[in-house]
Image (spheres, grey):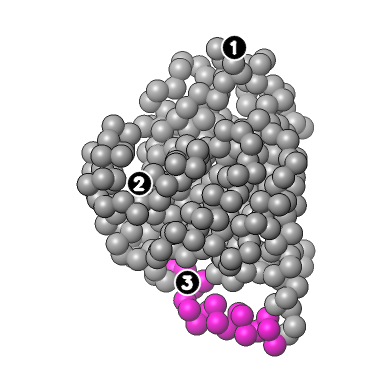
Amino acid sequence: MQDNDALGRYLNGRVRNGYLTARLERENGGGEPVFDREAGTLHPENLALSRAGLRLFLRVSGLYRRGQRNARRLHVRDHALRLPNLPAGMRGFRLLHLSDLHIDVDAAFADELAGQLVGLEWDACVITGDFRYQTNGDPTPALAGLERVRRVLDGPVYAILGNHDSIRMVPAIEALGIRVLLNEGVVLGDGQGSGIWLAGIDDPHYYRQHDIARALEQRPASMPVLLLAHSPEAYREAADAGVDAMLCGHTHGGQIRLPGGLPLVTNAVCPRALTGGAWTWQELRGYTSVGAGSSVLDVRFNCPAEAVIHRLDHRPQD
Ligand SMILES: [Fe+2]
């Protein structure tokens, strides 16, 4: 963990004035509360009593073990992601999309996840936030787990922070060879001088220090934009900024769904259609991953953990 001065020096030139102070102030509050006064939203899932009650119900009903097994079995999905004006050299480019690893849920999970990622074929990997299980506390176990996962990711990896992640984790994440995009962007190229602008913003759900305009500032003219945002809640801002496509996570797709697929909680202020899988909103295309890990409880029902391989395409899918 970095002290504030060292962190400021590390991020010097990458973040706007006041960003670090505002981020740390909100972090010092201890993570998302049951009632977020600033956003005016209620989060009953953060109530220890809710977690304990749900765990007790699942244990008494004999469902807990099954839910744990569901949470640890990764489904790999293929998805064609349309980007209009995609350069010819990027057609068919494969993006492995991981989200919401919550990797320190227990000591075994990182190796189990890593084992399920071995052998997947992709060109670049993006991780859309939430490395840590808790919203605060020591990130060392999450960073150690991430190191084990990074070892099997044989290619470039880009990431953004989620509402469970501390800005203090950035230097250690980047030391693993994972480029964190803090309201920044990079060219994801085809090696022939063309590519797409891969932009990433800070968590728009709880920390709300995200800045899409800043993430697009360095974008070469007319280059298609793919935005990484932890939560789909930034959808309006992304559409207004002219983003072509957006990859996100955060909702876990509900993590526990009723038979038929209805999520009990999604923890996101946005249309239900945006809380899991592929979606469109006006001209904006998006995909919200239901996540590879779990939080609140280490169980999943009717909502399998997933890794998504997005294949970039310039043609309409329907
Ligand atoms: Fe999450």
The three-letter amino acid code for the residue at tag 2 is Gln
Pointer 3 local density, CA inside 10 Å: few below 14, some 14–19, many at least 20: some
Mark 1: few, some, or many residues within 10 Å (few <14, many ≥20)? few
Residue appearing at x 50%, y 23% in the figure: 187
Element carrying mark 1: loop
Please give the residue where the numbered disc 2 appears in the rendered image.
209
Marked residue nearer the N-terminal end (1 or 3): 3
Image mark for residue 46 = 3
Cβ atoms under marks 2 and 1 closer than 8 Å: no
Horizontally, residue 82 falls left or right of residue 101, namely right
Is residue 177 depicted above or below 99 in this figure? above
The magenta segment is 42-60
Image mark for residue 192: 1
Q: Position of residue 192 (x, y in %)?
A: 59, 12
Disc 2 to disc 3, how far (Cα)?
22 Å
Asked if residue 111 can be seen in this view, the reply is yes
Label number found at residue 83: none
